[in-house]
Image: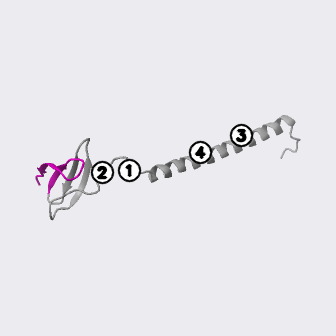
Amino acid sequence: MDDAPVSESDARLVRYLKTLVTALTVTMIVGFIVLIAVVVMRFNAAGTVPLPDAIALPAGVSATAITRGADWLGVVTDDGRILIYDLDGTTLRQEIGLDD
């Protein structure tokens, strides 16, 4: 090994690099914490699409899927139909049968 003394410029460079690495590490940790906070706040936010509390399905029918359009709700039923409702969920606008 070389036992030559470290020059002042080398010592300053090492201190600069050490400070730079520390600053970058702190920046990354703070950025990661902010990212996690944004994700948690977004998942805890209320839904952005309003849906009715209940949908008036025919007796003996259950929904397997639901979708919302601009002014309608579409419900796919377990008996092979698509029921189109107004946004209130009670007024049936259209019924579409699905072919197997």
Circle 4 SS class: helix
Tell me which label, 3 or 1, sits earlier in the chain: 3
Which residue, given by chain and number where applicable, does mark 1 sit on? 47
Q: Gap between marks 4 and 2, in whole Å? A: 35 Å
Q: Where is residue 18 drawn, in percent x and y?
A: 75, 43
Which residue, given by chain and number where applicable, does mark 4 sit on? 31
**Circle 3: is it few (<14), some (14-19), or many (20+) Cα within 10 Å?**
few
Q: Residue at x 45, y 52 (%)?
A: 43
Which residue, given by chain and number where applicable, does mark 3 sit on? 20
Which residue, given by chain and number where applicable, does mark 2 sit on? 51
* Residue 57, quarter of picture: bottom left
Cβ–Cβ under 8 Å for marks 1 and 4: no
Q: Residue at x 54, y 47 (%)?
A: 35
Amino acid type of the residue tagged 4 in the rendering: Gly
Q: Gap between marks 1 and 2, in whole Å? A: 9 Å
Does the magenta run of residues contain 84? yes
**Circle 4: is it few (<14), some (14-19), or many (20+) Cα within 10 Å?**
few
**Circle 1: is it few (<14), some (14-19), or many (20+) Cα within 10 Å?**
few
Specify whether 88 is left or right of 49: left
The C terminus sits in image quarter = bottom left
Numbered disc in front, either 1 or 4: 1
Which residue, as the protein is rendered here, is positioned at the far bottom?
A: 60
Q: Where is residue 9 drawn, in percent x and y?
A: 83, 34
Magenta span of residues: 80-100
Tell me which label, 2 or 3, sits earlier in the chain: 3
Circle 1 SS class: loop
Tell me which label, 1 or 4, sits earlier in the chain: 4
Q: Gap between marks 1 and 4, in whole Å? A: 26 Å
